[in-house]
Amino acid sequence: MIEKRLGVQERSNGVDFVVGGRAFEYAETKSDIRSSIGQLNKSRVPGMKKLIIPQKLSKYAIESTKGTGIGIENISGTVIKKSRKN
């Protein structure tokens, strides 16, 4: 579903998706959020970095990404937290 919304295919290494100089990681669980934050922080993509999550994990994701500049969206594309360009 996310691939269709972004119009891309999931990558085999690094961050899940790169679209227009922006990096995206998809996380389904709390443990996925931690590893996805690590992947986004390691990424050399020059633009914004976003974490895509199910709505039920929004509070945990907001808390986990404080101070990172990583933005958060739900799987429908609604922005929960804006990202800061790194």
Image: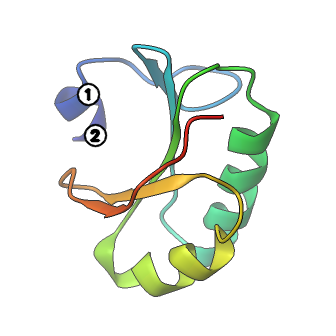
Say which residue appears at 32% left-offset and 17% top-offset. 8
Say which residue appears at 54% left-offset and 45% top-offset. 84
Q: Position of residue 68 (x, y in %)?
A: 70, 57
| The quadrant where residue 11 appears | top right
| The quadrant where residue 39 appears | top right
- Is residue 59 left or right of 32 when viewed as pictured? left
- In the picture shown, does residue 78 fall above or below 42? below
- Is residue 34 left or right of 57 when viewed as pictured? right
Kind of residue at disc 2: Ile
- Is residue 64 left or right of 19 when viewed as pictured? right
Kind of residue at disc 1: Leu
Q: Which dot marks residue 35?
A: none
- Cα separation between marks 1 and 2: 6 Å
Q: Nearer the viewer, residue 42 or 54?
A: 42
- In the picture shown, does residue 86 fall above or below 54? above
Q: Nearer the viewer, residue 67 or 24?
A: 67
Q: Under tag 2, what secondary structure?
A: helix
Mark nearest the camera among 1 and 2 is: 1
| The quadrant where residue 61 appears | bottom right
Q: Quadrant of the C terminus?
A: top right
Task: Please tell me how many numbered marks the rendered image carries.
Answer: 2
Q: Which residue is mark 1?
A: 6
Q: Position of residue 30 (x, y in %)?
A: 61, 76
Instruction: Assess disc 2: are there few (<14), some (14-19) or many (≥20) residues with their C-alpha within 10 Å of its C-alpha.
Output: some
Q: Nearer the viewer, residue 75 or 22?
A: 22
* Residues marked 1 and 2 touching at CB (< 8 Å): yes
Q: Quadrant of the N terminus?
A: top left
Instruction: Assess disc 1: are there few (<14), some (14-19) or many (≥20) residues with their C-alpha within 10 Å of its C-alpha.
Output: few
Q: Which residue is mark 2?
A: 2
Q: Position of residue 82 (x, y in %)?
A: 41, 55
Say which residue appears at 43% left-offset and 58% top-offset. 72
Q: Position of residue 62 (x, y in %)?
A: 53, 76
